[in-house]
Image (cartoon, coloured by chain):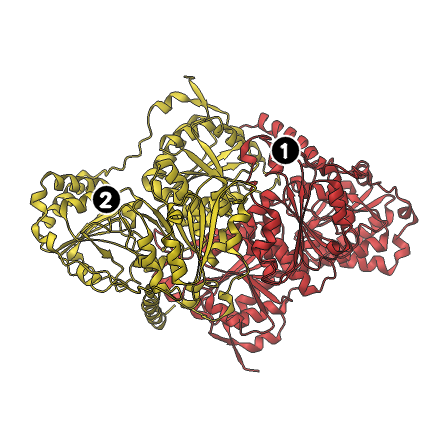
Chain colours: A red, B yellow
């Protein structure tokens, strides 16, 4: 092995070492030389996306499935700014990425000529670095050969541990600089640990005592459980304790929903009947990885008191009133689970095997007629198979999917906190890449509204280009129905172009006879038509890319959206009335 | 007339007053109430774009044609960040817009709950305002009713005068607040003036003297001439003086190219033979509205000395060595032109009627065979008619179009400084809107490469939705040929999906029998095929939306791109060699 390795290859070798096989991005003249270094690493495959925003969404989607950040390569200014909203969403919802930005040569940065992508007043290429400050955990702008390798290592390690976006800025003249290759023999340290072992001990011991003492315990696993790598531990916690367990709208799938211990999706007052009451009456709620945003808490309508609570968060823990800042749940949860598994009989108290199971109501078991919001989501739930990955776009879809019951090992992606429409079309590409790397046996199923689809539609072409075969459900309901529910139901600003022919979409983007790429597109206006599709084994097998267009009324909204809005409006009215400058 | 008007209507009435009939944007739950106020103004029409980046590009394109900023409405965080790269381009190239961002109610901003589109650590909704700081001239976040109207006026006035993006942030609870309507009777003051009249006098008088004394004068009108409203004055300057006159790659069309005084597109060493020599040997160069970026100066290879120069810029002027900071060219140029027109015989010296006309070489007059870069651009020039608006995408197209000769009154849009690919597809929508408002009798012609098209393709659907009939030339050459020319000619990172069927694009997006929308799509692989299209009167009439797909070799680059790269590479090598930290 050579004693040196180029800076570019060093970077990509390090990224490969965290467990990714692909690199996403868009070429631009300031990253091409860096990409040449990437192309010298046969184990890594480049996937170009149609644009940078979609690329960022894809990186986010990849991280949510794989649990590891992927790299996104853009070119400075135009590329990095285009990606910004996608990176911000990954920051808000803890779906990290390593955003690598190709920059002009160091000499050009210093001289500040008026080259393309600069701007007045002074052509300072660092201004874009400043613009991204709030949406990253850390960054490095590589310049000094003596520290490049350690800077790369530091930023990647922090990105993996924090699950937040990190940025590496690479001037084009440095990509070939030789770095010490022997450094690569020391693996990156990406293990999350807590510095304060005493605090950790205290949380573990108190929690175990509370578990033992509890007469009516529950587990509430929220989305940051998944984001921060705690899903499997949480499932082991459920198995060890048999406690009734709950997910949230963002974390659906974190608990195996086919398990007898799964007791529903808790969203404050916007939950199925009996669900909130069951959870909120527990004397102990082990709440892992909370993300307490409006639409993940029924509009802030959760009722959990400190004296019921063991909170295991990524940046703090809390046992009843006592807070432990800076303690990460992962090592804590691991120790709790290991203790429970060691003496399960001590903790898995018979009472928890006889808890009151919340019955999931059947909202609408239509067999015919128009396709309604009350019918579709639970029906899609029954269409799912174990190991499927399902993505629900911001809008009616993501409020609807909470009604579905998932089979075991379903992975679910939605972005109900950042809520950027069009997100899932890009994220689905990332999910497909992750699923292929993981050899996931399930299907990838995208549910997207017609308005959101128009934001990012071109990436459907990338699914085809790279040979992926997702099932795409397009909700055709004339525009932004979630906005109609909020305001201006009949205002034309909530309309979109209704001229797109979704039945021709796959053909346009590349699945045709002349390309030899199979596909299938169907349109359903009635329950009968849709049932025929759901029951068609060849459709369900998902061997080629497929679109199922579902026509629905533009004024039909999921009940959860309506309920959430009633709560939200009341709170807003109250806030406005009591507002003083 | 009522004594009060809602804040929202006040804002849109002011925007209407600067001369726009449309508002662009994407609805989101924090701007819907504001849009309700817009919809109460029958003179303004809402045009929803597919996404915010495209909306920003459209706003930019509109400003370049109309000379007036249009408003772009987005929702905070997700919307404003998606638009960011488009706004940045408009900042860099002085194509302003009024970016109106709908925000949560003031009470919600103060309370900072974890509502959607916020982020940790503290849900501060102002962080996005901070992120846009470098790409705007000024902004206001409306909050205090006592100052809202004057703040709106201030920001719009500054936006119009500066030709740079400005931002108005509107919390959703204020849109109905009553403001003093009588204020609207006082028009906004958008006239550019110079405070220092003495400096202005000096520049005008010295310039007139130099013009009189010059034996070999020239006019070089660059792109900020157009952006800052000086095109008509410049044409009057040419008419009054008969001086040989030059454009640049960014400003092509600023001088009537059918005029006997037009002497070529000056781009330093990357000009047609004789062009640079003719200009650079002038003893007086009146250089208006310069934008001295790499690709607008032949890679910084212009040779103009101070002792030849009268520079009339938007933020400073210069006469020989003497600089006048803060003086805007517009009032100066107006005075110079008026003086010249008053006594034309004094200034229009016979010598300027007999200057050496630079002959435009015929690069390639193919009549058959493959379509090449050397053939296509001059041929497209001959296809143009007076009053056409032509857009050339970043990439080979924008380097090629400099070869074309434009008929009179051609308007040209390209973004060779900011250089964000995909830009023209959005900008074309804005150009179409501006052209319709102006009742421009010409056609709108978009030239876009296949790679760039994939970035922003969905906006083609908006052309169809809103009934526009541009001619779209799609250069089909398997990806990013401009990047191939720069680096990695055969590297697959420069490939794109070649599976899209451009012949089916208009059909997919809405021009079909079932919608009753006419269209035409043709594909040309040879000169013969393309000539047949160019000579087809029904194609040239552009009565329906049309795609002409032109197949070209992926390794064929315009000569200007090659020449520019040779210069750029030499300078880069030199800079890197002499670089010290």
Could you tell me which chain the residue with mark 2 belongs to? Answer: B
Q: Is residue A309 above or below residue A430?
A: above
Q: Residue furthest right?
A: A350
**In the rendering, at what x and y percent does residue A161 appear?**
63, 60
Label 2, label 1: how far apart the Cα atoms are: 51 Å
Q: Which residue is mark 2?
A: B329
Tally of numbered discs: 2
Q: Nearer the viewer, residue A569 or A505?
A: A505
Q: Are marks 2 and 1 in contact (CB under 8 Å)?
A: no
The location of residue B235, given as percent across then percent down, is 21, 45
Q: Position of residue A365 (x, y in %)?
A: 80, 39
Q: Can you name the residue that lies furthest to the bottom here?
A: A1
In the displayed structure image, the side of residue A93 where residue B450 appears, left or right: left
Question: What x and y, as percent, mark residue B553?
Answer: 43, 66
| Picture residue at 60% right of the left edge, 65% below the top | A22
Q: Quadrant of the C terminus of chain B?
A: bottom left
Q: Secondary structure at mark 1?
A: helix
- For residue B16, which numbered disc appears in the image? none
x 59%, y 25%: residue? A577
User: Which one is closest to the eye, mark 2 or mark 1?
Assistant: 1
Work out whether residue B577 can be spotted. yes
Task: Judge the density around disc 2: few (<14), some (14-19), many (≥20) Cα neighbours within 10 Å.
Answer: many
Quarter of the image for the N terminus of chain B: give it. top left
- From the image, tell me which residue sits under label 1: A485
Label 1 crowding class (10 Å Cα cut-off): few <14, some 14-19, many 20+?
many
The chain to which mark 1 is attached is A
Helix, strand or loop status at disc 2: helix
Left-right relation of A456 to A370:
left
**Is residue A195 at least partly visible in the picture?**
no
In the displayed structure, does residue A26 sit left or right of residue A443?
left
């Amino acid at each position: 092995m050579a004693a040196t390795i180029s800076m570019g290859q060093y970077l990509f070798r390090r990224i490969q070492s965290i467990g990714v096989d692909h690199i996403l991005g868009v070429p631009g003249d300031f990253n091409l030389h860096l990409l040449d270094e990437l192309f010298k690493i046969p184990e890594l495959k480049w996937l170009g996306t149609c644009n940078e925003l979609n690329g960022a969404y894809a990186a986010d989607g990849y991280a949510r499935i794989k649990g590891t950040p992927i790299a996104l390569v853009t070119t400075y200014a135009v590329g990095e700014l285009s990606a910004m909203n996608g990176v911000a969403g990954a920051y808000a919802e803890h779906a990290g990425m390593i955003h690598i930005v190709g920059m002009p040569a160091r000499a050009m940065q210093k001289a500040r000529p008026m080259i393309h992508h600069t701007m007045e007043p002074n052509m300072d290429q660092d201004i874009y670095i400043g613009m991204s400050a709030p949406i990253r955990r850390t960054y490095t702008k590589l310049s000094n050969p003596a520290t490049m390798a350690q800077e790369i290592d530091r930023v990647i390690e922090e990105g993996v541990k924090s699950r937040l976006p990190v940025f590496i800025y690479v001037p084009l003249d440095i990509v070939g600089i030789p770095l010490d290759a022997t450094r690569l023999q020391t693996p990156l340290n990406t293990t999350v640990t807590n510095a304060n072992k005493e605090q950790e001990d205290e949380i573990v011991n108190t929690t175990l005592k509370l578990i033992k003492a509890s007469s009516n315990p529950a587990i509430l696993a929220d989305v940051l459980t998944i984001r921060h790598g705690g899903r499997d531990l949480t499932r082991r916690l459920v198995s060890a304790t048999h406690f009734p367990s709950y997910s949230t709208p963002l974390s659906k799938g974190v608990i195996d929903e086919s398990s007898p211990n799964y007791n529903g999706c808790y969203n404050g007052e916007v939950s199925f009947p009996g669900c909130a009451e069951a959870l909120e009456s527990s004397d102990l709620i082990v709440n892992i990885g909370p993300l307490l945003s409006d639409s993940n808490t029924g509009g802030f309508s959760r009722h959990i008191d400190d004296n019921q609570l063991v909170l295991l968060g990524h940046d703090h823990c809390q046992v009843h009133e006592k807070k432990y800042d800076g303690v990460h749940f992962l090592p804590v949860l691991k120790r709790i689970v290991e203790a429970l598994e060691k003496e399960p009989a001590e903790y898995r108290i018979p009472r928890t095997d006889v808890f009151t199971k919340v019955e999931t109501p059947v909202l609408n078991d239509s067999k015919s007629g128009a396709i309604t919001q009350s019918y579709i989501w639970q029906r899609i739930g029954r269409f799912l198979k174990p190991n499927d990955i399902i993505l629900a776009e911001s809008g009616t879809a993501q409020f609807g999917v909470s009604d579905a019951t998932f089979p075991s090992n379903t992975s679910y992606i939605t972005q109900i906190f950042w809520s950027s429409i069009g997100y899932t079309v890009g994220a689905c590409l990332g999910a497909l890449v992750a699923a292929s790397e993981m050899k996931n046996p399930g299907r990838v199923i995208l549910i997207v509204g017609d308005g959101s689809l128009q934001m990012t539609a071109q990436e459907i072409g990338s699914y085809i280009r790279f040979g992926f075969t997702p099932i795409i459900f397009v909700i055709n309901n004339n525009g932004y129905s979630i906005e109609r529910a909020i305001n201006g139901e009949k205002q034309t600003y909530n309309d979109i172009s209704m001229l797109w022919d979704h039945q021709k979409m796959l053909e346009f983007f590349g699945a045709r006879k002349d390309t030899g790429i199979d596909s299938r597109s169907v349109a359903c206006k009635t329950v009968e038509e849709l049932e025929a599709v759901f029951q068609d084994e060849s459709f369900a097998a998902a061997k080629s890319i497929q679109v199922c267009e579902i026509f629905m009324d533009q004024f039909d909204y999921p009940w959860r959206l309506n309920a959430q809005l009633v709560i939200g409006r009341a709170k807003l009215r109250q806030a406005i009335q009591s507002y003083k400058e």
